[in-house]
Image: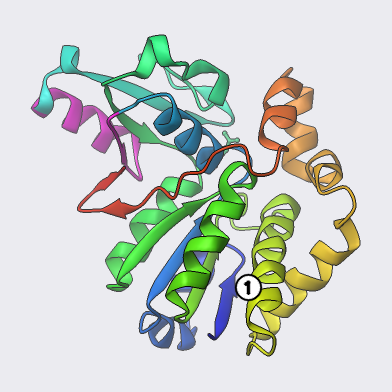
Amino acid sequence: MKITLTFNPSELVGAGFKPALAYWNVARVVVIDVLRACSTITHALSQGCRAIYPFASVRECQERARAMGRDKVLLGGERGGLRIKGFQLGNSPLEYPREVVEGKDVLFTTTNCTKNLNTITRLGKPKEVLICSLLNLPAVAEYLVTKGEDVHLALSGTNGEVSLEDVVCGGMLIHRLVGAYGHTPLSDSARLAHVTYLHYKDNPRQALLDSTHGRRLIGLGMKRDVDFCGRVGVYDLVPRYSKGAVM
Ligand code: MLT
């Protein structure tokens, strides 16, 4: 099993970033966004949400809502961390309890994660695209171990920059895969993530508190979201993105 990693979606399309093309021969891409989109998606599915449709832009989300029937879907997501005007839901996992999302389809757009998902499917055709946060990391690790094939970790980052919490989550996943396989070829970026995780090994939640985005969310009054997303292995779920929907 070979493991490669990109720190944010712009690396996937960056000028001269040729290896990206080679990456798409990997069997699986794991999309990571700890704060908060992948945590929110995983939590919503755990609450009985039928499917989440990720869109890169607000306009695409609204157009699809009109096509599907505005009263048949929920619109969710954020810009600048805040709920989008006219949307029923933001990007806080706490806004997605069973009584709100059970049996519902959610059309979803966020600043970085849904762009990451859309970029991946535009650039390549991996066998599977999986969604990972700390909440479901052990389940994703276990699944990848049973498959034993090459993996690319596509971190979402924040506005084209690296996000510490995503790096630590990616590093934790790598740690588990290396633990299961012994010698596993890692790209330099994957090795960097692994080393960063080892720094936070005894208290991964601290990475969320230290991170720029975590501090920003706390500044916006969203400390409960940061605490919620900092828990490891709460859900035994491996959400997959296929044909435009995460289920
Ligand atoms: C994103 O996809 O950019 C994030 O999930 C941002 C956020 O915390 O709302």
**Rendered position, 53 above or below 78:** below
Q: Whole-percent x and y of residue 51?
A: 28, 35
* Left or right: 138, with 63 as reference point: right
Residue 62's spot in the image, x, y percent?
Answer: 24, 27
- Give the residue displayed 76% in from the left and 23% down from the top: 223
Residue at the image position 48 percent from the left and 22 percent from the top: 90
Is 43 placed left or right of 231 in the picture?
A: left
Mark 1: secondary structure: helix
Picture quarter with the C terminus: top left
Q: Position of residue 146 (x, y in %)?
A: 47, 71
Query: Residue 16 placed where, x, y %?
Result: 48, 86
> Residue at position x 35%, y 14% from top?
86
Instruction: Kindly identify which residue carries mark 1.
Output: 177
Picture quarter with ligand 1: top right
Magenta span: 50-67
Q: Is residue 64 magenta?
A: yes
Residue closest to the eye, 246 or 10: 246
Give the answer, above or below, for where 242 lies relative to 94: below
Who's the residue at 44% across and 50% down the image?
Answer: 238
Q: What crowding class fits label 1: few (fewer than 14 Cα within 10 Å), some (14-19), or many (20 or more)?
A: many
Q: Is residue 103 above or below residue 9?
A: above
> Label 1 sits on what residue type?
Leu
Question: Which one is nearer the viewer's eye here, 137 or 63?
Answer: 137
Q: Determine if the magenta segment contains residue 109.
A: no
